[in-house]
Amino acid sequence: MANAVLPAQVPSPLLAILHRSPLRLERQNGLVLLFGHPAVFRLGLCVATDRALAGDSVLYLDGANVFDPFLIGRLARAGGAAPNAVLGRIHVSRAFTCHQMARLVTERLAGALRTYRARLIILSGPLETFYDEAVPYQEVAGLLHRILATLRHFAHLGHRLLCLSPVPPPEAKGRDTLLKTLSAQANRLIWVEATEAGVSLREIGASAPRSWGISRVVWESL
Amino acid sequence: MRPACLPTRLRGWLLDAYADRAGMAVWLLDEDNRRVRLLDPFRPTFYLAGPRHALDAVLRALPRRGCPLTTRWVERHELGSPDPVPVLEVAVHQPSRFPTLVRRLLQQCDQVQFYHVDVPLPQRYFYERGLFPLARCEVEVTVDGTIRAIHAVDSPWDTGYATPPLTILELSLEGRVSNPNHGGVCNLIVRVEGEERCLEGDDGAELVARLNQLLHRHDPDVILTDWGDSYILPRLLTLASRVRLPLALNRDADRPVGMQAPRSYFSYGRILANAGARTLYGRLHVDRQNSFVMAETGFPGLIEQARVTKVPLQHMARTTTGTGITAMQLETAHHDGILIPYRKREPEEFKSALELLHTDQGGLVYAPVLGYHENVGELDFASMYPSIMTRFNISPETVNCSCCAHDPAARVPEIGHHTCRHRTGLVPRTLIPLLSKRAQYKRLLAATADPMTRQVLDQRQTALKWLLVVSFGYLGYKNARFGRIEAHESVTAYSREILLQAKETAEHRGFRLLHAIVDSLWVHKPGATRGDYEALARAIAARTTLPIMVEGIYRWIGFLPSRVDPRMPVPNQFVGMFETGESKIRGLEIRRADAPLIVKKAQAEVLRSLSQAQTVVELRAHVTHALEIIRAYRHYLQSGRASLEDLIIAKSISREPQAYRHQTMTAIAARELLRHGVRLQPGETIHYVMTDAAAPLAEDRVRAVATLDGAWSYDARAYETLLLKSARVILAPLGLNPTDLDDLTNPGSSRA
Amino acid sequence: MGRTLTTFTQLVWQEIESLRRYRRALRQEDQQALDTLFAAARRHSSAGAYLARETPFEIMLLSMLIEQQKQLVALTRKVADLETRVPADPPARVAS
């Protein structure tokens, strides 16, 4: 019976699935890492929309150049909200180099959290800029170290952090350890896979292993 | 090369400069036609900022033994901040040790900010001394060749400069069109001072000895090659070491030949290959096949770019135009006491997703009105983006400055940014002289009749045009030192506003907008005269405050349909005939590097025939003749007489040969080369012919040109299809459907 | 550095792609009509991009209507033109 009220609250079947998963990010989850298939980016945008629909301010740090306001617009409309209001609650900054990404996290994030009174931080493809061979590995590793220290600090202060990271591209030769370093810092790890049936999410390393599925029909209706 | 006793004053041209142990080695081509190596005891500096303890740690880490350094505290500015900051200046007494020293510190000290560390030393030297490549200089020297004082007597902004009397030795491969690294053997051709020799490679020792002989006898200043970077020089050097003979390529005998590995990189969404580099000391090596600027603007253009950017000639020849414009910005910064940060760190300011929707846009492109039109005027904004940057003061430090937030005149249209009204930005300051020098060249060009002089002037102005073209991209480019996304967004926002103003002005005066691309408009009004179009240009210039010119009036112009969907027009794809009888063609096979020569020839002939038409009605009358041309070419193809040169298709490979997932012709040819042991890098161009395009076995469909032997034949049908496609795009808007085109040009058909 | 946002032309392609099943089930002549409508949408990409709305489908519909309206005007003009050329002939006689 309690379920009967659910459809009115949730904007779409997809967001309903997210609500049942750790991506709801309601409790003190610390740093959640969504990794695996590039579908992580889309899922991240869904989470951003979901929180913005609930009236929250969201910070979206884009290192992968994948931000998509049109998807958010569609989801917002499906959720019965004015797209502009939802888009206005999501604040974006793009980084095109690892140095920019590092500066964004370590020097700009605190101010933005205050300005926009945001509680949710989404880091989209934080490592994508770190695979650039033009920057020596040692330098890159140092930057990542500083980013992670800052993220730990914000998680400690009670901010919700969601990291979206696809598996490293083949060009990332020898830098796949960066993802391991990142995942070692995460409080919850969710592996994302895309199959014929749709997209599946599986929590790794939890005491009770859990998984969630999004059917292809729902996923493609986005 | 160093005369025992030198006069104290020398005049001449600066040929080369590079870091040496005790300073910068400087090569001068003096007035007595001597090549002199001098030494300037120049000490390059870099700067450090950070917490005191971190700087102390750096000071302790600085290796002083064997490499003397001087440090002192100075004040410098960060770009855009009004207050100076104290920084530690480190002067390195041995310039040749500078790069290693800096690399080590960068790895060791991560809490310190580094400035001025990665500006190439010859450029730093040029900035400090007011010099530039091939400058005419006056030098005061001591008897041992040490420079006491050096200064340029001409300016990089001169338009009437003389170039030094350079001796050029050319190296090329006999009868070679495609990349020699893809296979085949050929002889070395040497051209110098009007003589040409063919050196056969049978006896390695003799070849090296003969080349040495020529190098000693002529002592060339420039070695100009085709495929020198990737093929000739590497092979000559290997050969010389095998036969144990030194090869005198370098003028500076103490130096080995400089070497850089090949690499692939992305530029404007395309992958490009750089074939690596073999560079010389005291002498300049330029590979025509590995130089964008040489291909676009020739040697005069290369010299022009090296002079204004102060990037050494050998580097300018091989690097991107973007490196050139960045170098110019670095110089502006250096002169103003602005610190040049190591790696760009400034990220985008947070903006709402709604704002992003409006700011993340490019220039406006109006799809053309399909078909042929008469009496059309093309109006072009001159260097629109650079003009916007200088006119509206757009620069990383001027966008969203703290002083002009409430000034309505500072507001960027539509997107909520503003630019500074008080201080001229670094980017405009760099661009203003460039824009004015190009305008000067264009004025000179208009007033010059001599074809040789005209060609040089045109190459020089084109070289500057390229620098201006990329200056915009480098406002947003990820590696641009002084780039910023908000500056990039401001430029495109202004460009959209300005194009809309131009459209409105034209429509207000009764013109119809047929096509527009960012900074060009094609407009039409029945009965309009040249005077009317000129008046329109003046009206647009008055409203937008940006210079706009009538590029020309077309007797007729055809905006041609998409090859995939004939309903769709394609931007910047047209064929037009100016009143003057000249034509302008965009997007057709004839302008494409990958189309086979036979297709280009046929298309050129069709266009020549059409060009006789004065009106669109006359154009229709010329269709029959066009069909005859295509028919003749098809007949020629079917007869099997087409030559290899006619049939070669050149394609750039977008990935490693193994990484292709589909059996495209390019993939098949690339893999064939790979099987022959050829190493290919993404961005490289390969050449192939279609042998049996529909063959079930992929390897039979195409053959790489480099591996062709005596026995091969081409697929006439496949080439005919290309031919028909190239004709269809031009003739379809004149009412010819594809089936008719095929039937009417088929040599065997009764309808023809 | 590439742009982040999908261009308007790409958005039209996405829309077409999302209607793939719909298009497939249409008769061929109706598919052609549908393609013509979307070609009209692409023709006004610059105006669509300049507006920069987060739900671009409405703008595509408007672009289709613009092209239809232009055709309507052109056809009306043609009919009027034909009517002046064929003065006062009773319809029955024209038909015979």
Image: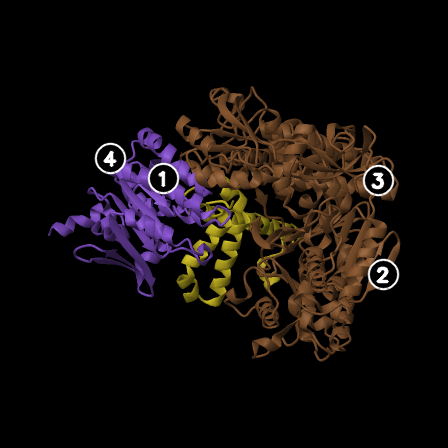
Q: Could you tell me residue A221's position as x and y percent?
A: 34, 56
> Is circle 2 on the same chain as circle 1?
no
Q: Which mark is residue A146?
A: 1
Q: CA distance from mark 4 to mark 1?
A: 17 Å
Image vertical order of residue C74 relative to residue B435, above or below: below
**In percent of the image, x 73 and y 53: which residue is there?**
B288
Q: Which mark is residue A157?
A: 4
Q: CA distance from mark 3 to mark 2?
A: 26 Å
Task: Give the letter of the brown chain.
Answer: B
Question: Which amino acid, mark 3?
Answer: Arg
Q: CA distance from mark 3 to mark 4?
A: 72 Å
Image vertical order of residue B432 relative to residue B474, above or below: above
Question: Which amino acid, mark 4?
Answer: Leu
Q: Residues within 10 Å of mark 1 (few under 14, many from 20)?
A: some
Q: CA distance from mark 2 to mark 1?
A: 62 Å
Q: CA distance from mark 3 to mark 1?
A: 57 Å
**In which chain is the residue bearing label 1?**
A
Q: Could you tell me residue C28's position as x and y percent?
A: 48, 67
> Is circle 3 on the same chain as circle 4?
no
At numbered mark 1, what does the secondary structure look like: helix, strand or loop? Answer: helix
Q: Earlier in the sequence, mark 3 or mark 2?
A: 3
Quadrant assignment for the N terminus of chain B: top right
Q: Which mark is residue A206?
A: none
**In percent of the image, x 10 and y 52: which residue is there?**
A1
Q: Residues within 10 Å of mark 2 (few under 14, many from 20)?
A: few
Residue B361 shown left or right of residue B445 in the figure: left
Q: Quadrant of residue B128?
A: top right
State if disc 1 and disc 4 touch (CB < 8 Å). Answer: no
User: Drawn colour of chain C?
Assistant: yellow
Q: Earlier in the sequence, mark 4 or mark 1?
A: 1
Nearer to us of marks 4 and 1 is: 1
